[in-house]
Image (cartoon, rainbow, N blue to C red):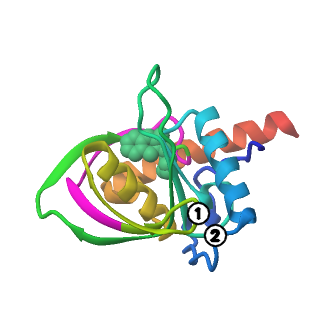
Amino acid sequence: MALRQILTEPNKILREKSTNVEKVDDEIRKLMDDMLETMYAAPGIGLAAIQVGIPKRIIVLDISGKDQVKKPMYFVNPEILDKSSTNSTYEEGCLSVPGQFAEIDRPEKCYIKFLDYYGKPQEIKAEGMLATCIQHEIDHLEGILFIDYLSKLKKSMIIKKLSKQKKAIERIIV
Ligand code: GNR
Ligand code: NI
């Protein structure tokens, strides 16, 4: 297993639309293992392949709390079959938008169809934090970030801050 670098805003790659995986083979499983390790190290509770620069429709998640038994989940080519008309609000963050958090409204429940770690078709009903996280990750596959749901002003303030931070880091490296 290996750690991969997580891309952060502003970065055009994060805006790419990811494409379906043809076959869940050893190469895809290796990528999923690396993604999970990278997510745990960050630490985060979800990661989409595009966040490590790979535009494939792959998500890893683990919403078990710390001190709990780890419960990794893998979703290949996830599709939302149905979502509730009622919403719930969670404070969201994103490893690609470091240090920024905001309350985001999303459907509180959703039904998801996907391929698992072995390429087997599965369907689940997601609620609570899991539903929020899956939707946050599926947004990544479409090039959407949670800051896109904020007002233009809030979003531009966040992007400005992050691009300043990036430039400061570049100056240290160069
Ligand atoms: O680690 C993460 N926490 C989180 C909290 C609330 C809603 C969504 C998330 S996902 C995020 C990791 C990440 O950026 N995944 O794309
Ligand atoms: Ni994210």
Residue nearest the observer in this picture, 115 or 172: 115
> Would you call the spot at circle 2 few (<14 residues within 10 Å), some (14-19), or many (20 or more)?
some
Question: Can you say whether 150 is above or below 42 in the image?
Answer: below
Query: Residue at point 56% right, 68% down?
Result: 119
Q: Residue furthest top?
A: 67
Q: Residue furthest right?
A: 174
- Kind of residue at badge 2: Val
Q: Is residue 50 visible?
A: yes
Task: Work out whether residue 125 or residue 93 is closer to the camera in this orientation and state it.
Answer: 125
Mark 2 CB near ligand 1 (8 Å cut) = no
Looking at the rendering, which quadrant does residue 111 occupy?
bottom left
- Determine the secondary structure under disc 2: loop
Q: Can you give x and y, in whole percent of width and height, for residue 109 in the image? A: 21, 56
- Residue of label 2: 24
Quadrant in which residue 167 is drawn: top right
21 displayed left or right of 91: right
Q: Earlier in the sequence, mark 2 or mark 1?
A: 2
Residue at (78% x, 44% y) in the render: 2
- The percent coordinates of residue 36 (x first, y second) are 61, 45
Q: Residue at x 72, y 47 (%)?
A: 5
Q: Residues at badges 2 and 1 in contact (C-beta under 8 Å)?
A: yes
Which residue is identified by label 1?
118
